[in-house]
């Protein structure tokens, strides 16, 4: 059965997971040093998937006769209400911590897991009911922070990613389609 729960931002957590490659190892150094595996106090997390669909029009027709899939672009942003060096480090890599680092150096890459789970809702087998969006191969693109006079300091990063996975979890079962062929 598909997960039909309605979630709010209060039900969400953002977890960073390192990859097993040089970019992932640099990200793991930063993630473990700042202990930011599960990032708290995030706000305004957005993930956008844009597909370049190309329309084919036949002469004499106003509507397209077919749509052809094109490139897929994955991007997004994350805001949070405190500042430390982790986000800048994940953007700039070693150069942010060691200015004398010689080129070339890798830009850290990691996976972001956005998990939505309402602790009050459980599956029939007593396990959790959750929805997960796993954004793979994330690299931060831009970082900024806003220093208002009478409000919270907010830092924000934008990112690009390689792929996205979705998981609907009900108890011990991951629910989803089975594709044949």
Image: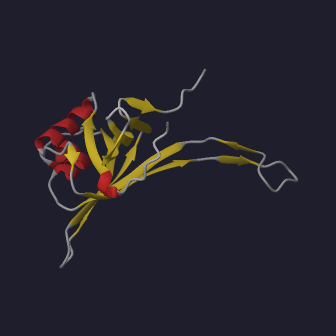
Q: What's the residue at 78%, 49% (across, down)? A: 57
Q: Is residue 38 above or below residue 181?
A: below
Judging depth in this view, the residue of 56 and 119 nearest the camera is: 119
Q: Where is the C terminus found, in terms of image quarters?
A: top right
Color theme of the render: secondary structure
Q: Is residue 100 above or below residue 153?
A: above
Judging depth in this view, the residue of 23 and 157 nearest the camera is: 157
- Farthest-out residue, front: 124
- Farthest-out residue, bottom: 150
Residue 103, position in %: x, y? 23, 39
Residue 104, position in %: x, y? 25, 37
- Farthest-out residue, top: 181
The answer, for residue 39, to whether it is visible in the render is yes
Judging depth in this view, the residue of 16 and 102 nearest the camera is: 16
Corner quadrant of residue 132: top left
Residue 37, position in %: x, y? 20, 42
- Farthest-out residue, right: 60
Q: What's the residue at 39%, 36% (across, down)? A: 169
Q: Is residue 15 above or below residue 48?
A: above
Q: What's the residue at 13%, 43% (across, down)? A: 35
Position of 93 compared to 33: left or right?
A: right
The answer, for residue 108, to whether it is visible in the render is no
Position of 51 compared to 153: left or right?
A: right
Number of numbered tags placed on the structure image: 0
């Amino acid at each position: 059965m598909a997960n039909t729960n309605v979630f709010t931002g209060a039900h969400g957590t953002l977890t960073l997971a390192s990859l097993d490659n040089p970019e992932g190892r640099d990200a793991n150094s930063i993630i473990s040093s700042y202990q930011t595996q599960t990032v708290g106090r995030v706000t305004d997390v957005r993930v956008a998937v844009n597909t370049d669909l190309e329309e084919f029009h036949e002469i004499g027709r106003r509507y397209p006769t077919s749509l052809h899939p094109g490139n897929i672009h994955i991007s997004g942003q994350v805001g949070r209400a405190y500042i430390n060096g982790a986000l800048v480090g994940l953007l700039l890599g070693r150069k942010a911590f060691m200015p004398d680092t010689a080129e070339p150096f890798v830009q850290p890459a990691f996976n972001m897991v956005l998990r939505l789970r309402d602790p009050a809702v459980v599956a029939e087998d007593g396990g959790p009911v959750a929805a997960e969006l796993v954004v793979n191969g994330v690299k931060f693109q831009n970082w900024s922070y806003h220093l208002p006079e009478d409000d919270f300091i907010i830092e924000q990063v934008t990112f690009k990613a390689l792929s996205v996975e979705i998981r609907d979890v009900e108890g011990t079962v991951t629910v989803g389609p089975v594709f044949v062929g």
